[in-house]
Image (cartoon, grey):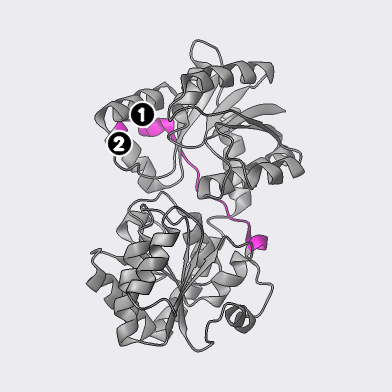
Amino acid sequence: MKRVGMVIGQLTYGGAERQLYEACTRLPQHGIDPIVYCLSENTEPYRELLESKGIQVRTFSRSSHFDVKRGWALRKRIREDRIDLLHSWLIDDNPYAWMATVGTRLRFIASLRSRPTRRDPLRKRIDRFVFNSAQCVLANSLEVRDFLVEEFRIEEKRIEVIENGIDLSRLTPRRPKEAVRTENETPIEDFLVLFVGRLDKVKRADFLLESFSFAIKERPNMSLWMVGEGPMKEELANLAANLEIDEKVHFLGTRSDVGDLYHAADLFALCSETEGLPNVVVESMACGTPVLLSGGANCSDLVSNGENGWICDEMTIDRFSSLLVGIVDTPQNRSAAGEAARESSRERFSIEKMLKNLKKMYLEVE
């Protein structure tokens, strides 16, 4: 059984962290023995979940943003664990995988899961060097692959595109839509918009709140659920109050019943500055809930505008709120888009397909 070390910066709630968990807990059934190397002590909830499934997790203390000591500590630990291959899951983790393997026979796989924002010239040079030092580079979408070729000059033949897999059993609704809405103090008759994600600047949840405040003036029977935690939560709650929409905006925090929430919503909205292939978009579509996205969500190879969702081509509040009102006013189009979203996502993003492709990549890298 090939032993693969999985390197990741933290094991808190996040898209990459969720994908790592889904992969590591299933790969042993496919002949791959994973060990997780977390480059910080921010390990909850996934450390406990991984260990409950028998997956070993190693952690490293962090003293600075880029800590050379962690790289050498990782190098020592993977040698002790007799790792056959190292896989770094995020761009900020890639240099540590390089440090841990340079000068040895051990190969490593680098990853890019979204377009990085605000990288200074030095960091771009480091990223390019590390990507080109890796045995291969994993991208989770065609758009990310194209970005690697254009921005970092990676040969396309060295890039493996493996799209995210979703666990459909996790999304099966456990309660009726009406009960979920009532529990969260939302009228049954309201048009419900759902956001799921980290409340930070990249997700631009403030833009969503402002767009919603414009739309609700025209269509008062609307509600918005904000699911997730993050550094901007208090700021966003204050913004909702200042916009006088706080009675219609519900901050639900971290939830384990996301399947119920997707099914209870009429529309999923994401205004991100940049993404790779967001798990939440795929999950929403798999539940039959259509999506309204920013161009920065990088989902043009997944969402066909007007067919299985909508992509806002001009990220202004007027344009986004206008699209939102138009979707509210056309329930037949919304229903058709939801059904098309379900069909287009369920087969393409199956967890088994992702596992098969990961195993193939791991076995081919020597």
From the image, state whether disc 2 or disc 1 is nearer to you: 2
Given residues 136 and 21, the one toward you in this image is 21
Q: Mark 2 points at which residue?
A: 119
Task: Examine the rendered structure and indicate whether residue 22 appears above or below residue 157.
Answer: below
Q: Which residue is drawn at 53% across and 17% down?
A: 72
Is 32 left, or right, of 94 in this rendering?
right
Given residues 311 and 240, the one toward you in this image is 240
Amino acid type at mark 2: Arg
Where are the magenta residues, as a range? 152-170
Pointers 2 and 1 in contact (C-beta within 8 Å): yes
Please state the horizontal and vertical placement of residue 353, each as a whole percent of the image.
59, 49
Q: Mark 1 points at which residue?
A: 127
Neighbour tally class for label 1: few under 14, some 14-19, many 20 plus, Cα within 10 Å: some
Please state the horizontal and vertical placement of residue 291, each as a whole percent of the image.
42, 68
Q: Residue 215 carries which label?
A: none
Q: Which residue is drawn at 53% across and 72% down?
A: 288
Neighbour tally class for label 2: few under 14, some 14-19, many 20 plus, Cα within 10 Å: few
Q: What element carries label 2?
A: loop
